[in-house]
Image (spheres, rainbow, N blue to C red):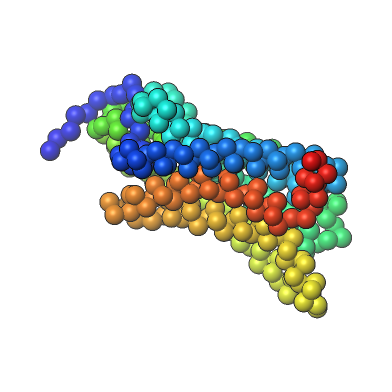
Amino acid sequence: MQRNQTSVRYFIIKGISDDPYLQLLIFLLVLLIYLTTISGNLTILIACRDPRLHTPMYFFLGNLSILDICFSTVSLHKILIIFISQDNRVSFLACMMQMYMFGSLEGLELSILTAMSYDRYVAICKPLQYPLLMNTRTCVILAAACWILGFLQVFPPFWIVYNFTCYFSNEINHFFCDIIPMIRISCDDTTFVEMLFFIEGIFPIILTPFLLTFVSYIFIIHAILRIRTTSGRLKTFYTCSSHLTVVILLYTTLFGQYLTPNVSSTLESKKLFALFNTAAVPLLNPVIYSLKNKDVKRALKKRV
């Protein structure tokens, strides 16, 4: 069956479910998660203002909290707006901007977590050199590089998708504008952009930060195993356990979202991975860091 090939002025966000009762449940759940995410990450930012937390670890944690607030807002706001307004249309420009911001912030989070893994590596493997290697200037340069790289590295595939000339349909089978659903509904030749997305997206954005983080933890674990006492090993591991937990959660959802086969049986599961990635991970970040960190809890008690 031949489908119409046309340019579009707006897209229709299909969402997660067509069931009105399930839509209500999803709306309430997403609203609760979103408000909790915002308040939790704002709490972390308030705690990081404590002078005792003016260290590289909490500097990057503050960057991560700002990022999570932006990430949740970009990816979840459309679900809330659609349910309230009962209008699931999104303009072409708004859709393109959401796609670009989502991809940029996703890559940025991986970069920030990689910088945090380097901080933990220096702290554990080179403790005597830590004040010199992780001084304020180094931390600012690392953070700035992460933010700049995050917004630059997704621009080439975004620009190609932005310049698509026609679409088979204007319905996006997702709950936000993501690059993969956009490619699927385009009637242009998408071979190059798919190859570019795979090479640039998987390797620089996901695989490179993953390998850098993985190598950092190999050295960290090796250094921990060389500690003679069990209590010393546990205490040292505790300093990086929060970061490691967040890394495992994020990469697990990313692999499920982007690296599973693109067959019809997995489309709905990809939506669930995407929902967990965009909603649960930013929510869990402040929970993990606040519950597993005595310094953060002490700073919060001081602020109350």
Residue 303 x %, y %: 80, 40
The answer to whether residue 94 is left or right of residue 243 is left
User: Is residue 29 visible in the rendered structure shown here?
Assistant: yes
The image quarter containing residue 168 is top left
Residue 130 x %, y %: 83, 55
The answer to whether residue 101 is left or right of residue 297 is left
Residue 21 x %, y %: 34, 40
User: Is residue 196 visible in the rendered structure shown here?
Assistant: no
Residue ID at (64%, 50%): 287
Q: Work out whether 190 lies above or below 82.
A: below
Residue ID at (33%, 54%): 266
The image quarter containing residue 128 is bottom right
Report the residue that reaches farthest toward the left.
1
Quarter of the rendering occupied by the C terminus: top right
Quarter of the rendering occupied by the N terminus: top left
The answer to whether residue 194 is left or right of residue 69 is left
Instruction: Judge by depth and name the residue closer to the eye, 39 or 99.
Output: 39
**Image label count:** 0
The image quarter containing residue 237 is bottom right
Q: Work out whether 37 lies above or below 225.
A: above
Report the residue that reaches farthest toward the top.
9
Residue ID at (36%, 27%): 86
Residue ID at (30%, 33%): 171
Instruction: Judge by depth and name the residue closer to the eye, 144 or 25.
Output: 25
Residue 17 x %, y %: 33, 42
